[in-house]
């Protein structure tokens, strides 16, 4: 729930887990609050899905999100909001 209530999510450039770890450490060193870092990670995961998995393809009314990340309500929420605001 921290990510859902974060006032100012950190913008991470990397979407790969191997590289985003460095971005997270940098955000911590810069003094960003934990909730904004977590929200930024959620945005990066959703963005990665939309850009790398979904791409320009049309998505129907139901989307099945699976795996461990699907258990995170903030990721599902962000993905839904981002997908509904993009042209299909």
Image (cartoon, rainbow, N blue to C red):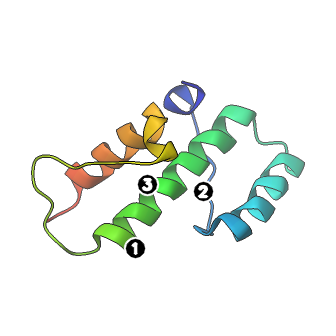
The circle drawn on residue 46 is 3
Q: Nearer the viewer, residue 1 or 66?
A: 66
Q: Earlier in the sequence, mark 3 or mark 1?
A: 3
For mark 1, give the secondary structure: helix
Alpha carbons under labels 2 and 1: distance apart: 18 Å
71 in relation to 24, above or below:
above
Alpha carbons under labels 3 and 2: distance apart: 12 Å
Residue at x-position 59% and y-position 39%: 8
The circle drawn on residue 11 is 2
Q: Are marks 3 and 1 in contact (CB under 8 Å)?
A: no
Q: Of all residues shown, which one is farthest toward the right?
A: 29
Q: Which residue is mark 1?
A: 52
For mark 3, give the secondary structure: helix
Residue at x-position 21% and y-position 49%: 63
Alpha carbons under labels 3 and 1: distance apart: 10 Å
Camera-near label (3 vs 2) is 3
Sort mark 1 into few (<14), some (14-19) or many (20+) by Cα contacts within 10 Å: few
Q: Earlier in the sequence, mark 2 or mark 1?
A: 2
Residue 58 picture location, percent across and down = 13, 67
Q: Nearer the viewer, residue 64 or 23?
A: 64
Relative to 78, 20 lies left or right = right
Residue 46 picture location, percent across and down = 43, 54
Relative to 8, 58 lies left or right = left
Camera-near label (2 vs 1) is 1
Residue at x-position 50% and y-position 55%: 45
* Quarter location, residue 6: top right
Q: Earlier in the sequence, mark 3 or mark 2?
A: 2
Q: Of all residues shown, which one is farthest toward the front?
A: 67
Q: Are marks 3 and 2 in contact (CB under 8 Å)?
A: no
Residue at x-position 72% and y-position 70%: 19
Relative to 49, 38 lies left or right = right
């Amino acid at each position: 729930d921290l990510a859902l209530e974060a006032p100012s999510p950190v913008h991470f450039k990397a979407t790969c887990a191997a590289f985003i770890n460095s971005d997270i450490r940098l955000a911590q060193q810069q003094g960003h609050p934990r909730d904004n870092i977590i929200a930024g990670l959620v945005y990066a995961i959703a963005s990665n899905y939309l850009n790398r998995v979904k791409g320009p393809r049309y998505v129907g009314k139901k989307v099945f999100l699976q795996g461990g990340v699907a258990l995170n309500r903030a990721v599902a929420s962000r993905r839904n909001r981002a997908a509904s605001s993009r042209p299909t």
